[in-house]
Image: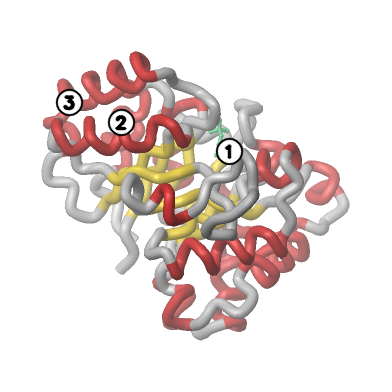
Amino acid sequence: MRKVIIAGNWKMNHSVSEVLTFFSTLSEKRKDLEALENIEIIIAPGFPLLAYAQSLAEDMNLPLKISAQNMYYENKGAFTGEVSAEMITPFCSHVIIGHSERRSLFFDTDEAINKKAHQSLSSQLTPIICIGESEAERDSNQTLDVVHSQIKKSLKDISDIEVSKVILAYEPLWAIGTGKSASTDQAQEVHQSIRSYLSELYSPQIASNIPILYGGSVKESNCSELLNCPDIDGALIGGASLEASSFVSIINKIKYFSK
Ligand code: PGA
């Protein structure tokens, strides 16, 4: 059985005071977060706020994990402005790797994403590896080829044992931040194809245990139908994760789903 995973990607949002407001509201709504057995909740703040978010979650006894939004693949050295796995591991358990904004705005290549995946796994950080096609690629029927190629390259030389610790997130670029989510048919088709491609690369048993999240304009109004799809195991949420009340509403809608 796979866990349902709800991850909030805050991107470059939330100052110290906003983080406090978010966690205080979450704490007020803690009843909604109690007894969540089959669901994992993850919040990904910006680098400087990881330690603060982690200590607030601990102090308020909130059942959630903290993720970074990126990292560099070298562990130390002359890489001005970069942040290593070693620097973040005391403050988080997960790291988002290869988000489409990193790929398009900061030139993260599949090769770099693969190196980051290796480094995160050897640093005991769970990578959330993002993949997804552009609108032009979808329009020219290349979605599955693009996604399979991203998976193959980002998981290069990752062993059966290591891949069992990986989380994948399918995020079609045209759905990110646009308010226009993939339909359940579109999302399920890609998720199912990802799972069968993982079966080919690894084994059906391994593939059936890898969580595959959907991301792209997930909100309260569409989360249930998306999470109802058999191969969608959770959501990576940007905009709708910024306000604690909308994030908790999403959790409330899907917290008794099982996969
Ligand atoms: P969105 O972002 O929910 O605002 O579309 C998702 C993401 O980029 O991870």
Q: Position of residue 102 (x, y in %)?
A: 66, 43
Q: Is mark 2 within 8 Å of ligand 1?
A: no
Are there few (<14), some (14-19), or many (20+) residues within 10 Å of tag 1?
many
Secondary element type, mark 2? helix
Please give the residue where the numbered disc 3 appears in the rendered image: 27
> Mark 1 to mark 2: distance in Å?
27 Å
Q: Is mark 1 within 8 Å of ligand 1?
A: yes
Ligand 1, image quadrant it occupies: top right
Secondary element type, mark 1? loop
Q: Amino acid at mark 1?
A: Gly
Give the residue displayed 13% in from the left and 37% down from the top. Answer: 61
Secondary element type, mark 3? helix
Please give the residue where the numbered disc 2 appears in the rendered image: 52
Q: Residue furthest front?
A: 78
Nearest-to-viewer mark from 1 and 2:
2
Rendered image: mark on residue 216: 1
* Left or right: 114 in relation to 240: right
Q: Position of residue 70 (x, y in %)?
A: 54, 46
